[in-house]
Image (cartoon, helix red, strand yellow):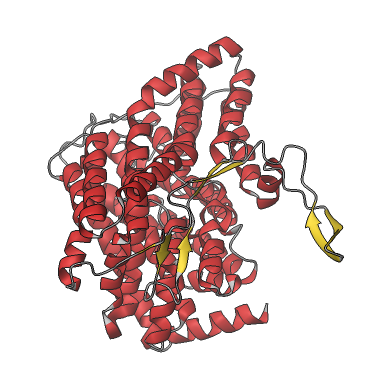
Amino acid sequence: MIWSQVYDPLGSAVLSTLCAAIPIVVLLGGLAFFRLSAHVAAFAGLIAALLVAVVVYGMPASMAGMSALNGALFGLLPIGWIVLNIIFLYQLTKDKGYFKILQDSIANITDDRRLQLLLIAFAFGAFFEGAAGFGTPVAVTGAILIGLGFSPLAASGLSLIANTAPVAYGALGTPIITLAKVTGLDEMALSAMVGRQLPFFSLLVPFWLIWAFAGWRGMMGIWPAILVTGVSFAIPQYLISNFHGPMLVDVGAAMVSMACLTMFLKVWKPKDVWHTTKLKGHESDGGEEAQPTSFTKHDSGLVLRAWIPWFILTVFVFAWGFPTVKDFLNGVSQEKRVVVVDGKEKTEQVPYAWKGVTKLDFPLNGLNELIEKVPPVVAKPIKEKAVYSLNWLSATGSGIFLAAIVAGLFMGYSLGGLFKKYWDTIVLVRYSLMTISAMLALGFVTRYSGTDATLGLAFAHTGVLYPFFGTMLGWLGVALTGSDTASNVLFGGLQRVTAEQLNLSPELMAAANSSGGVMGKMIDAQSIVVASTATRWYGHEGDILRYVFWHSIVLAALVGVVVTLQAYVPPFTELVVHGVASAGAH
């Protein structure tokens, strides 16, 4: 039996929207105001989502349950699988003393906390966002910042703020590539359009990051370094996105930014060196005030050995991100053969022997293609797929796991020692894995029940203000799903339909969904749990949420202002016209 989604079950757009928001209010309110443990708040939100879906929206209970199961499985793999293995590698390097040497080597580039933030949280984090995405950058940078002496709130909150501008091109351009497939718009046009929105924020976010940490005077004390970091990221981001495509935008821009900042710091030093880890406006942030520390200068060979585990990680993550590598690991060959079917020649791919072994697809009976998404969310009715892919070899977390094993053997661990440390890591992050699964289950229930579409339609009814609120819709999508890719899947079609009805550029509004979404990344519950896990600050997810929440809203609103200017106000409108035209030329 096909169940069609209903977006106004109560016959009142206001009341239906308020009901649709209940699960999110329960989740975020439990974290921020009632200070519930993350896994308790997540399960409370999940229960609320199930009740709203079944009681208010009339979703069959069996479908709601299968939606939750689908989300929980997705939470474990790929998301939880990434977190588990990043923490595993971190534990390996920490116990062997290599992590301390890595910290010393970074500190010897600069012992100023503000400059370390630029180098690690922004530039290095952007590289991992571009290569892997899905929580990897926050996990890596959070762990490194804690090791450098940053307090838990500083390491967590600032890693989340820094991981914004690169998100739209994360995981080798996956959000943009997916957006193009969902909307039917040209991939290059979308890449170019986002590349004409986010560079403004690639320049702004480094300033914002240091202001959030050190205040205005602290920011102005290193403004030349911030400018170098932002400009050297924004320019490659614009050029690669507009003239090459979405895949290598973050990787290329991050490498240029890291190189430029490192070289700049060889010839420029701030007048006052900051050793403090206090956040602006926080008398106590959960960690002790760091005192000026003299970091050991190690032999260059030892420093190289300390960095090798992270070089190994970079190689594996980068390789696992390429579609051709993923296809190979999944058993999909590029070789083609001609076969005859019913007397007609047909071309098909020649699978490798391991096809169907390394990637197993499980259609969820009772859910797959039994839910219909209908207008005005989509142009015409479409059936929602519900297929869980167990891509145990090609998943990014598997690349990280293999990198950790190789790095562990390099560092002198035995296989038995690696097994013991892996078990210890599972015990360490068990509650985080439960939390991520519950939060993804909540997100999938809202998606399949249509409650998130109800929230989206509320934004779509804003008329001439839609460029602003459509951007905020992207922000909401990432806050709900934890992924810019998922937000584009969720609201990409709605953005195009609404834009065409309002005589706006569909490329502009589809891109705005992705650009606005990046600012929602810092408050999505999944990212906050990843941050608390990486910094070993369990149970303080509410503190992290309260710290980053207003940063997220204000930055998203600024993206909305830029998109509104591009929609209506010359010369910003020229960016839209030229962006679409240049993409067409390609």
Q: Is 314 placed above or below 192 here?
A: above
Q: Is 220 placed above or below 154 here?
A: below
* Nearest the eye: 538 or 202: 538
* Nearest the eye: 130 or 73: 73
| Residue drawn at (20%, 54%) of the image | 55
Relative placement, left or right, of 405 versus 44 is: right
* Nearest the eye: 316 or 288: 316
Q: Is residue 547 visible?
A: no
Which quadrant does the N terminus fall into? Answer: bottom left
**In the figure, residue 238 lies in which quadrant?**
bottom right
| Residue drawn at (33%, 51%) of the image | 445
Disc count in the image? 0
Rendered location of residue 96, percent (x, y): 51, 16
* Nearest the eye: 129 or 239: 129
Q: Is 557 placed above or below 326 here?
A: below
| Residue drawn at (34%, 73%) of the image | 470
**In the figure, residue 186 lies in which quadrant?**
bottom right
Rendered location of residue 323, percent (x, y): 66, 52
Q: Is residue 320 visible?
A: yes
Rendered location of residue 476, percent (x, y): 31, 61
**In the figure, residue 312 lies in which quadrant?**
top right
Which quadrant does the C terminus fall into? Answer: bottom right
Relative placement, left or right, of 110 versus 52 is: right
Rendered location of residue 446, percent (x, y): 32, 55
Relative placement, left or right, of 433 versus 9 is: right
